[in-house]
Amino acid sequence: MGRTAGPDCAAPFLTLDGRPEGAVSADGAVIGTYLHGIFADDGFRRAFLDRLAARRGREGAFGELDFDARVDATLDELAAHMAANLDLDAFAGIAGL
């Protein structure tokens, strides 16, 4: 939450409920927003990355990016790593479980 002021606010990142949100620098290289979790939305992220790729002549350069599946896979990898490298029974005992 917050407020941003300055000349770049004249070019909002997007419009949300009819109001400007965020800011884009004059050269388009820097974008800012207060929207938490915006890149967790697969559709938004895909459109955003596709637009960046197109600006650089690399359409479709990012492949499929399923946020929820990637988070689940990362958490599974972390759990497996912890189980393989920590004495989880000792931790459970310390925690009184």
Image (cartoon, grey):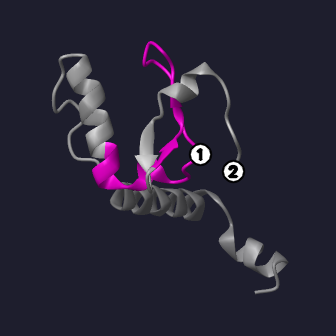
Which is more toward the observer, 92 or 24?
Answer: 24
Identify the residue at the far top of this view.
27
Give the label on residue 71, or none: none
Measured Cα–Cα span from mark 1 to mark 2: 6 Å
Helix, strand or loop at label 1? It is loop
- Which residue in the protein does label 2 denote? 1
Cβ atoms under marks 1 and 2 closer than 8 Å: yes
> Where 88 falls versus 75 (above or below)?
below
In x, y percent, where is residue 58?
18, 22
Mark 1 Cα within 10 Å, few/some/many (few <14, many 20+)?
A: few
Taking the spot 42% from the left edge, 63% from the top edge, the residue there is: 72
Give the label on residue 34, or none: 1
Which span is picked out in magenta? Answer: 19-45
On the rendered structure, is 36 left or right of 1? left
Residue 39 covered by magenta stretch: yes
Taking the spot 47% from the left edge, 27% from the top edge, the residue there is: 11
Taking the spot 25% from the left edge, 25% from the top edge, the residue there is: 53
Quadrant of the image containing the C terminus: bottom right
Q: Amino acid at mark 1?
A: Tyr
Q: Earlier in the sequence, mark 1 or mark 2?
A: 2
